[in-house]
Amino acid sequence: MTNPFDEFRGSPIDWSDMLNLSKVMEILRHTPDPEQSRSLIRTSTIDPNDLLIVATRMIELKRRDHGRIAMEEAIRQLDADPDRIAPDIDIVFAKRNLCFLLEHTRDSLSQFDLVKKEPKIVQADPQLALAIAEGLINQQRFEEAAFVIARIDEIPFAVLSEKLAKINGWVDGTNAMRVEAYKHVRWNSLPGWWDDVGPGDVRRIVPAVEQNLQRRVGMGHDDTLLLIRQLAVTGDRRAIPVLTQALRHHKSSVVVDAASALHALGDAAGVEALISGFRSAPEGDKWRFASALQDIRDSRAVAVVADYNAAQRAAEELKQRRINEGLCVTCGKALGFMDKMSSRQAHKQCS
Ligand SMILES: [Zn+2]
């Protein structure tokens, strides 16, 4: 028996020849189980570019599963040998179509596998990407959801706005998903204040922070910190410029919270600012940066925190040894009789 996939006329297939369309229908009729068509495809010599178009015809004939299998096989063959991709075939778009076909199965993990292999699907169709991210979050697959959202985050806000303009509330919806996914994957533990603040409207908060950052030196910044924390839990990336600006603030508490907020929004500058802040901070301020870095799940942060903790431990051991040996905890020299009599641990001039 000849393989019906080998019997299409022309390559590219000539669809004005009605015989080709009836060949598609014949395949559908003779393979009630879509998987049967997969084995036929695998033993045929059909050009995968042609197979992609056959898949489209099957989908137009409402045979989604047949279409999906033909598409999977075509993409598999083209991926294995990209030189075969015809100039008129947009392989990213083909993969996006396959991903879209899986939408009705609610099989978000299979969709994710496609996105992971071809992240450009996200740029090609951010709306589909958001639907996939939502499906993944519903299944508590936060790592996978965060991967998809990080790709969405690479698209400029203006471009996203244009592509998603028809979706009501896409900004808030995307923000909520970003917060949920990143919350689970970007932290060892959430900052202590995380649950004390709720999301707000960035269009109001951002100008308020901008104004606060202009304040004279010496004034308090409790309200600024609250606003910055609110930006973190809101998850709106339009806050990134003002948070970046806050990294240059003279108060380390403002810098630390702004950096943590940037990290919450998926911006790499957050960890970088905490590390460089840690390095340049005066000794008494380092703990602030170290404890923020400790909350963050990031290999660079882990290294800095480990160094800091080792240094702290060494200092503590040195202090204990000096106390045990009756030496001044500060300078390490012997304490005088009067110091010991008044139970000092350091010389008067050293404490
Ligand atoms: Zn001393």
Image (cartoon, rainbow, N blue to C red):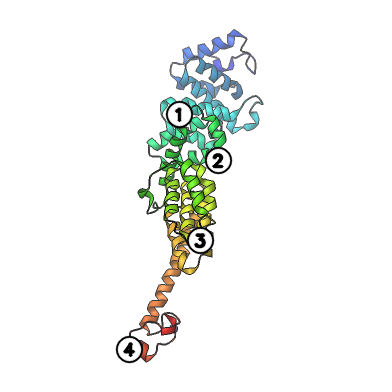
Q: Residue at x 49, y 30 (%)?
A: 128
Question: Which residue is tagged 1?
Answer: 168
Of the residues tagged 4 and 2, which is closer to the observer?
Answer: 4
Q: Is residue 317 above or below residue 60?
A: below
Q: Between residue 86 and residue 157, name the one nearer to us.
A: 157
Which quadrant holds residue 290? Answer: bottom left
Q: Does residue 48 appear left or right of residue 254 in this picture?
A: right
Of the residues tagged 4 and 3, which is closer to the observer?
Answer: 3
Q: CA distance from mark 3 to mark 1?
A: 43 Å
Q: Earlier in the sequence, mark 2 or mark 1?
A: 2
Find residue 233 and report its horizontal and vertical position in percent: 42, 45
Asked whether the viewer can see residue 137, the reply is: yes
Of the residues tagged 2 and 3, which is closer to the observer?
Answer: 3
Question: Which residue is tagged 4?
Answer: 341
Q: Please name the amino acid that badge 4 sits on.
A: Met
- In the rendered structure, find residue 154 and report the number of the disc placed on it: 2
Q: Residue at x 51, y 20 (%)?
A: 40
Q: Which quadrant contains ligand 1?
A: bottom left
